[in-house]
Image (cartoon, helix red, strand yellow):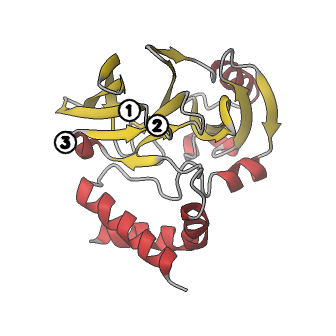
Amino acid sequence: MRIVSLALLFLLGYADAQQASQANPKSCRADVFVPESLKQSVAIPSPDNRFQAVLDEYREEEDSESGRLTVFLGKTLLGRYRLRGLSAGIFVKWSPDSRAFYLMWSNGGIIGGYDVRVFRVVSHAVREVFPMKIAETEFKRRHNCRTRGVNAFAVKWMTNSEQLMIATQVYPTSDCGAEMGLTKGYTVRLEDGQIVQRHSQKIIENEMKECPTPFWPAGLWDDNTLQQVKSEINSSARKP
């Protein structure tokens, strides 16, 4: 219960944002899971209901957990991908036009490393794309943590599947020196990763209060903790 209580102290400040998000069917919020959620198959349908991203095959490994991503068009299998190094939050979000989705996960809690994979789908195929490389390279040239490197996050889709807003961050730990926690934002083109727009720390941190989520599961959360937190957020958002 202590884990839930601490989480809720952090979350209740976002109740108004949650209420606004529920009123908007094109919310930037991702579906949020923890590794234990993958003990059962969980399906995340595209907005047009033609495609599904399915997470399952939870496994415990020596130092982390793993799972599987499967992509379907109706009942037709488009692709399978192994997911390794899972810990804490797992986030999935389709683009509004149902032509792409990202999968993001933590390998060590809120200040651990984050991995992002992005996929494009068409009628009978799925392919992985890598739109974050140019922005990450630019950020690392100017800001880097010698001991840990940098983090990168998917933040939100920009109207359709052509552009994605991302955040890059110097690890927020003391061994990263004076720039610890420094965060910058980029809007990148999905097809080739070209930078469309750069965003200040103030702007990107404000975006990340709601997108991709107002809460970031910690490594100790199990699925029961996750569901309790979601339920409390929804209850708080409904209060006048």
Q: Three-letter amino acid code at disc 3?
A: Gln
Q: Which of 121 and 64 is in front in this view?
A: 121
Q: Is mark 3 on a helix, strand or loop?
A: loop
Task: Name the N-terminal-most of marks 2 and 3.
Answer: 3
Q: How crowded is mark 2: few (under 14 residues within 10 Å), some or many (20 or more)?
A: many
- Residue 18 vs 145, above or below: the answer is below
The residues tagged by marks 2 and 1 sit, at their Cα atoms, a distance apart of 6 Å
Residue 73: x and y in percent read: 38, 24
Residue type of the residue flagged with mark 2: Ser
**Quadrant, the N terminus:** bottom left
Check if mark 2's residue and mark 3's residue have beta carbons within 8 Å. no
- The structure residue drawn at horizontal position 52% and vertical position 53%, both measured from the top left corner, is 213
Quadrant of the rendered structure where residue 179 is? top right
Name the residue beneath numbered marker 1.
52
Q: Which amino acid does label 1 sit on?
A: Gln
Does residue 185 appear in this view? yes
Nearer to us: label 1 or label 3: 1
- Write the residue at 19% across / 42% down: 40
Pick whichever, 190 or 100, lies toward us: 100
* Comes first in the chain, label 1 or label 3: 3
For the point 60% across and 50% down, which residue is it?
Answer: 26
Report the residue marked by disc 3. 40
Name the residue nearer the viewer: 134 or 113: 134
Instruction: Give the residue pinned by disc 2.
Output: 46
The quadrant holding residue 70 is top left
Q: In which quarter of the image is residue 43?
A: top left
Residue 63 in the image: state x and y as whole percent.
25, 32
Q: Is the C terminus in the top left, top right, bottom left or bottom right quadrant? A: bottom right
Q: Residues within 10 Å of mark 3 (few under 14, many from 20)?
A: few
